Amino acid sequence: MLFLALLPQFIDQAAGWSITVQIIILALIHIAISGVVYMVVGFSAKAVLQARPRAATVVSRLSGGAMITIAAFLIIEHVIH
């Protein structure tokens, strides 16, 4: 969604490349940058949570609770509609 929301301002119709090529290049750049960011976040989280087992337990419980809450809201919304 973020990519699609920001995409139009970076497309230049007067450029030498077609709009399709520009979109593909922007998508590849977006994927590469996102991959690097998520990899850094993942390795950092692993390092922090391995060093602090109590924090890992708290994060796991909070994540599980959030997923259960979101699932409950989705089920309720589905039943209501």
Image: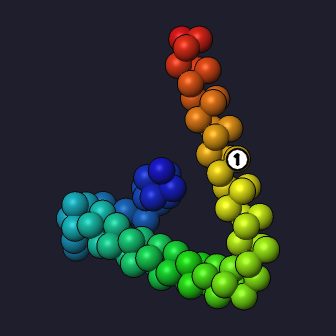
Horizontal side of 53 relative to 23 (left or right) equals right
Examine the rendering and report whether any part of residue 14 can be seen: no
Image x and y of residue 41, in percent:
59, 78
Picture quadrant where residue 67 is located: top right
Quarter of the C terminus within the rendering: top right
Mark 1, other Cα within 10 Å: few <14 / some 14–19 / many ≥20:
few
Name the residue at 64% across, 79% down. 45
Q: Which residue is mark 1?
A: 65
| Residue 50, percent from left and from top | 66, 84
- Secondary structure type for disc 1: helix
Q: Please tell me whether residue 71 is drawn above or below residue 19 in the rendered image.
A: above
For the image shown, how many numbered marks are present on the structure? 1
Residue 80 found in image quarter = top right
Q: Position of residue 7 (x, y in %)?
A: 43, 58
Colour scheme in the image? rainbow
Q: Residue at x 22, y 73 (%)?
A: 16
**Towards the viewer: 34 or 65:** 65
* Depth order, front residue of 44/35: 44
| Residue 10 visible in rendering | yes
Q: Horizontal placement of 64 versus 7: left or right?
A: right
In this picture, is 1 found above or below 38? above
Indicate whether 55 appears above or below 13: below
> Callout 1, which amino acid?
Gly
Residue depicted at x 59% and y 20%: 77
Q: x and y percent of residue 9 in the render?
A: 47, 60
Q: Could you say which is closer to the camera, residue 41 or residue 9?
A: 41
Q: Is residue 14 left or right of residue 30?
A: left
Q: Residue drawn 26% across and 67% down?
A: 24
Whether 29 is drawn above or below 74: the answer is below
